Image (cartoon, rainbow, N blue to C red):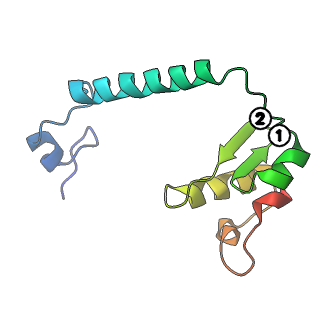
Amino acid sequence: MAMMGNGHSENDQQNGLDDDVIPEEWLEEIRRRKKLVSEACEKYKSVKIPLTKEWIKENGDHLIVEDQYKIIYCRVPKSGNTSWKRLLLALSGIINDTSMAHGKNGFNPRDL
């Protein structure tokens, strides 16, 4: 597939994809999602969750906390999770080789 100077393939150009044009239906979906998040935050704003390291170690199997960069990452399988896990482990200085994020020597997020 031939790439053009703008990073798009010829096929992208034929399909009308352009960096400067976002289809209206995508924008509408983004607005809908933002509204849902706002409504959920408003509804549950009084709920207090103790996001301490101790609470997360006991209850947060799916959470990875990186204190230095003030990041809390919620792991979702099959959604690019391994890439994020590798990045966070490397940032934490826990691993040097990103292949260590998986396998028999794989890292347990509770160790963060």
The answer to whether residue 6 is above or below residue 55 is: above
| Residue 21 visible in the displayed image | no
* Residue 93 in view (yes/no): yes
Q: Amino acid at mark 1?
A: Asp
The type of residue carrying mark 2 is Lys
Which image quadrant for residue 110? bottom right
Quarter where residue 17 is shown: top left
Compared with 55, 38 (above or below) is above
Q: Residue furthest right?
A: 54
The residue carrying pointer 2 sits among few (fewer than 14), some (14 to 19) or many (20 or more) residues within 10 Å by Cα, namely few
What is the count of numbered marks? 2
Give the label on residue 70, or none.
2
Marks 1 and 2 close (CB-CB < 8 Å)? yes
| Residue at (64% x, 47% y) in the render | 74
Which residue has dot 1 on it? 67
The quadrant of the rendering that contains the C terminus is bottom right
Residue 37 screen position, x and y as percent: 51, 26
- 99 w.r.t. 12: above or below: below
